[in-house]
Amino acid sequence: MSENSSAATTKISTYLMMIVLIVLALSVVALMLSVNAFIVGNEMVAGYLLLIGFIAMALSVYVLLQSRKRIASMKIEAPKVMTTVECKKCGFKSVREFQRGDFVFKDLDTCQKCNDKMIITAIYKEVKEKEKTYGV
Ligand SMILES: [Zn+2]
């Protein structure tokens, strides 16, 4: 499941990257054309092209920065799956990260305190309270 979502994220980010690069290339072309128009003597066209070039460049840089931020926040929010292990005899309890093959009521190693068998009593996703993100 996590593999699929990360693959989708990479696909989106490469798609976005392509658009950003195209816009960036167009802005460079617009700036070059504006220089050309200025040399020819068409100052009004040069001014417009200069404006378009700068706006396109600013926009692509902005999108690039925003997407970086979003991808970084996605990585942080992946929740951990935890397993609670309990000894039925003495009540000794411990929590560890989920391991492959874990299931509720599965017998595990002996208890550290009384040497009786310990079992898994709960498997759950660790839910962290969402930290407030600054800015947009
Ligand atoms: Zn015990």
Image: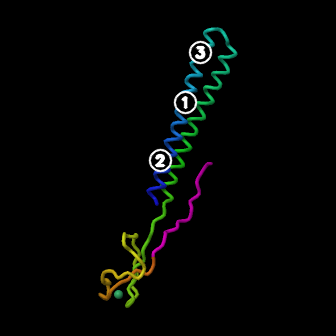
Disc 2 crowd, CA 10 A, few/some/many (<14, 14-19, 20+): few
State the CA–CA distance, disc 2 to disc 3: 37 Å
Q: Which residue is drawn at the image coordinates 52% and 53% (left, top)?
A: 73
Amino acid type for the residue under numbered disc 1: Leu
Helix, strand or loop at mark 3: helix
- The residue type indicated by label 2 comes to Thr
Q: Amino acid type of disc 3? A: Val
Q: Which residue is mark 3?
A: 35
Magenta highlight range: 123-136
Chain-order first, disc 2 or disc 3:
2
Residue 125 drawn in magenta = yes
Name the mark nearer the viewer: 2 or 3: 2
Question: Disc 1 marks which residue?
Answer: 24
Q: Looking at the image, which residue is at 55% across and 24% down?
A: 28
Spot occupied by residue 65 in the image (x, y as percentages of width and height): 54, 41
Q: Is residue 93 left or right of residue 129?
A: left
**According to the image, label 2 marks what residue?**
10
